[in-house]
Every structure is written in structure tokens, then in C-alpha cells.
Amino acid sequence: MPPPVPPAGREKAPAHTPAPAHRVPGKWGDGRRVRIGLLGGSFNPAHPGHRHVAEMARHALRLDEVWLLVSPGNPLKPRAGMAPFGERLESARRIADGRRVIAVDVEARLGLRETERTLSRLRQLFPHAEFVWIMGADNMVQLPRWRRWRKLARGTPMAVLPRPGYTRRALDGPAAAVLRRYRRPCSALLAGAPRGHAAWCLVPAREHPASATAIRALRANATAAAPGHSPPSLPAPRQGAPAPAH
Ligand SMILES: Nc1ncnc2c1ncn2[C@@H]1O[C@H](COP(=O)(O)OP(=O)(O)OP(=O)(O)O)[C@@H](O)[C@H]1O
Ligand SMILES: O=C(O)c1ccc[n+]([C@@H]2O[C@H](COP(=O)([O-])O)[C@@H](O)[C@H]2O)c1
């Protein structure tokens, strides 16, 4: 195995020490010839839908590994309500097996948040690895809002997972329309780039209903219903200000 690629100057020192039993990718890259699926996400929190997506993609594409790429902060999501990075990473570790499905903090280590930048850097750090971007149909719908998404789709094969309420919208949406010529069956996704453009596929899997938004809502309801919980009080109206309408 070639020596690890040295860190570039602006990269940050690792902020999180992995749990001892959990294998992590080479700190600054490695030279393995492996097929790696990247399931990027907020994991706020991780849930069985993520594990389902990782396993379905791994089997459909014959991937050696799937990395649960925990985002330091989705560029399109507000910070409010986002659990701290360490908590989200820990939650991703709990649904990983540490061997084929691995929770990774490389974006935080590299100080990157936008996927196209992350992919470019990962290709330098892991020059012999073949990367596939994995995402749910909801992200395929909003793909045209991502930074340099056409470049991302040109250079990186993508596997899209069905998701309740989004599968049809993704297949009928603007990203699918632009990329229509490059859609392939998943078995042919990694067979080479058609016309110099990476392919994408819809993974033939059942839809999984889990969602982090729903889990957060359930937790908030449970907290609100807990004995002794008093709802947050409204700020007192300023002297002379009208009383709030209820
Ligand atoms: N049930 C699911 N089916 C298909 N894809 C999923 C599912 N849950 C998550 N994903 C995909 O996994 C990736 C990471 O998702 P994320 O961590 O945002 O979870 P989420 O449940 O979508 O969260 P939130 O509800 O907070 O947006 C995204 O590409 C998302 O589309
Ligand atoms: O690169 C972008 O502009 C971009 C915009 C929105 C989302 N993403 C990535 O999409 C992945 C899914 O994010 P999320 O929050 O929906 O789980 C995660 O890896 C984000 O960094 C990337």
C-alpha cells in the first residue's frame, strides 16, 4: 500500500477520536482499489432508513464499502435544530457495522461541506478508489440547487434511492431531465463513463419510511408531554406594546 498522502496545509486536525472497534479510512488517504459508496447526510439523527439505503446500494452496485459521510453542515439547511457534529457522528456510528458500512468524519477533517469539493479532494486522497455518490430521491429533487452540480454529476456516478413522496418527483424533475441520457441500470453504473459523462441509476429497492424530521418531531412531542415539563414561556411584552394575539 502506498504511503498516506500528507495533509494539505489548510486542513484541520481531526476533531473526533473514533470508537476503538470502529475502522476508519486512512487518515490522509490510502491507495486501496476499492469501490466506495458515499452516503452524505446530516444524520440528525441517523435512522434505519440510512442503513437500508446503504445496504441496498452496496448490494446493487457491488460496493466494497459504504461511508456514512457525516456533514459538518449541509450548505442548504439552517443551523437551528442541528445537533452538534459529534452527536450526529456518534449516531451514524450506531447504525454502521464498522466494516462494510462505516461512519466517517472526513468532511469535518478536511473543512469541506459542498459535495463537489469533497469528491475532488477524496479523489486526490484515494487515487485508486472508485467513488459513487448515494442519495435519496429527495436530494435528487433539490440537486440543481447544489454548488456545481453538473460537474458533480459529470465526474461521479450517482445512485438514487426511492423515498416515499419523492421518487416520482425525482424521476420527473429537472436534474433527471438534464441527466436523462446518462441514466443506466445500476448493474452498468460503473461500467465506464458514457460519452465522457458519469452515469446514474435508480436503485431498485422498496421505499423506506424513516425520516430524521419525523424522529425529531416525535422526540419533541415526547418531551413536551413528559410530566413536569413546562412549555417555554413567551418573552414578557414590552411596556406599552400590544399583547400578543393567541
Ligand atoms: N428513508 C429514506 N429513504 C431514502 N433515502 C433516505 C431515507 N432517509 C434518508 N435518506 C437519504 O440519506 C441521505 C442523508 O439523509 P439525512 O441525514 O438528511 O436524513 P433525513 O431523514 O432525510 O433527514 P431530514 O428529515 O432531517 O432531512 C440523503 O441523501 C437522504 O435522501
Ligand atoms: O454541495 C452542495 O451544494 C450541497 C447542497 C446540499 C446538500 N449537500 C449534501 O447532500 C448530503 C445530504 O444532506 P442532508 O442534509 O439532506 O442529509 C450531504 O452530504 C450534504 O453535504 C450538498
Image (cartoon, rainbow, N blue to C red):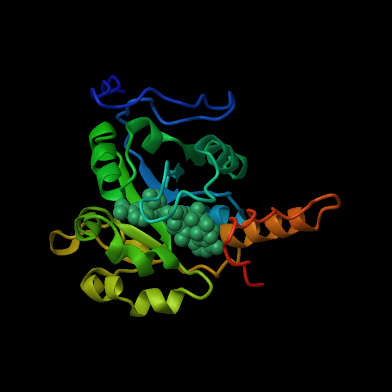
Would you say 195 lies left or right of 232 here? left
127 on left or right of 46: left
Q: Pinpoint residue 10: horizontal percent, then vertical percent.
A: 25, 26
Measured as percent of width and height from the top left, residue 87 is found at 57, 38
x 27%, y 32%: residue: 125
Residue at position x 26%, y 49% in the image: 116
Q: Image height check: is 67 above or below 133?
A: above
Residue situated in front as seen by the camera: 148 or 187:
148
Residue 186 visible in rendering: yes
Is residue 244 placed above or below 18 in the rendered structure?
A: below
| Residue drawn at x 43%, y 67% as measured from the top left | 137
Q: Using the image, determine if residue 6 lies above or below residue 216.
A: above
Q: In which quarter of the image is the C terminus?
A: bottom right
- Compared across the picture, whether 129 is left or right of 55 comes to left
Q: Name the residue located 35 percent from the left edge and 66 percent from the top edge.
A: 142
Between residue 223 and residue 131, name the one nearer to us: 223
Q: Nearer the viewer, residue 86 or 159?
A: 86
Q: Which residue, as the protein is rendered here, is positioned at the far front?
A: 240
Find residue 45 and report its horizontal and vertical position in percent: 58, 49
Q: How many marks?
A: 0
Residue 2: image location, x then y, percent: 27, 22
Question: Going by the picture, which residue comes out furthest to the right?
Answer: 227
Q: In which quarter of the image is the N terminus?
A: top left
Q: Picture quarter containing residue 199?
A: bottom left
In this view of the protein, can residue 56 be seen by the observer?
no
> Considering depth in this image, is 229 or 179 the residue closer to the camera?
229
Task: Residue 92: name its quadrant.
Answer: top right
